Amino acid sequence: MAAPQPPRPALDRIRVGSAPDSWGVWFPADDQQVSWERFLDEVAEAGYAWIELGPYGYLPTDPARLTDETSRRGLSVSAGTVFTALHRGPAVWDATWEQVSRVAALTQAMGARHLVVIPAFWRDDKTAELIESPELTAEQWRDLASGTERLAAEVRDRYGLEIVVHPHADTHIDGEANVARFLDATDPDLVNLCLDTGHYAYCGGDSVRLIETYGERIGYLHLKQVDPAILADVVRDGVPFGPAVRRGVMCEPPTGVPALEPVLTAAQALDVDLFAIVEQDMYPCPPDQPFPIARRTRHYLRGCGA
């Protein structure tokens, strides 16, 4: 008779949520996306208590209305999200701040404390055409670091929010080398990381090793997995991220990589409170596809102790 397995330790520093991305939402408005009402209904029914705002304008932007819509479903907001192109230097600051301030104000009004900052794609997000070099010059790296620090200070001082920078496929902050370079170039008192396990694996990174190496810089988690067989084809064929998603490169846990239980265990060992927001990129997708996946994923994460 097999010996009983010891219970998994509770991941009591990890707060699990989900996001519009897991419902195939990439844009404020798109006829291939589910309505925001359906997203809120289904994310609550799937068992999540925390959500992100998603693309600004997808959910209602009036704080009173959004508070009513979320609270009556038992939902709270963990973060807002912005896209920036700070490597382009001071010339983009005013336009950057205009959109960041809108999202930050709504994020603050919803009681959240984090702003997820995603670097600009070097491909067009709809056509996948190359729009700038995938490699930054030394001057662009300096502009990226200093611009991000300025953004962090402004967001902190004006809105009381902490920025967490999200390494992302088809951006200049992607795999191990560029993430390390970015972290080493920025002030740890200002700039922390949103570790997206799927994007980091997509770009060849090891999430557990990143947590163990730069643990004090991990301020937030996005949980997702990649299908290694599809990823191998994507890498071989040089497929841009958008078309890769349409191939199904981001897959339902626990069928892909990285294994999420070791990631969550490593994050728990940091002994700080962390959000872990499920994001399974699948734009576009049939409207009935996201909910059962979200419910199964929540059940799987409970089995991991989260």
Image: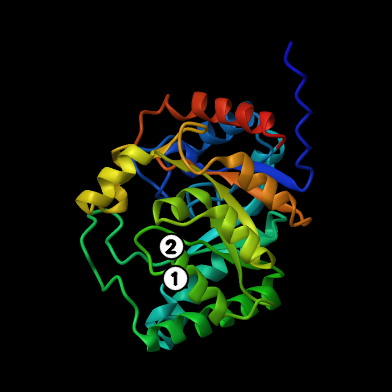
Tell me the number on the disc at residue 175.
2
Q: Residues within 10 Å of mark 1 (few under 14, many from 20)?
A: some
Q: What kind of residue is marked 2?
A: Gly
* In the image, residue 280 above or below residue 107: above
Task: Give the x, y percent position of residue 74.
Answer: 72, 35
Q: Which mark is residue 178?
A: 1
Q: Position of residue 208 (x, y in %)?
A: 59, 53
Q: Residues within 10 Å of mark 2 (few under 14, many from 20)?
A: many
Q: Is residue 106 visible?
A: no
Q: Is residue 163 visible?
A: yes
Q: How many marks?
A: 2
Whether tag 2 and tag 1 are in contact, CB under 8 A, the answer is yes
For image coordinates 30% across by 67% down, the residue present is: 122
In the displayed structure, does residue 19 sit left or right of residue 172?
A: right
Q: In this rendering, would 254 be left or right of 133?
A: right
Helix, strand or loop for disc 2: loop
Please provide percent x and percent y for residue 294: 54, 30
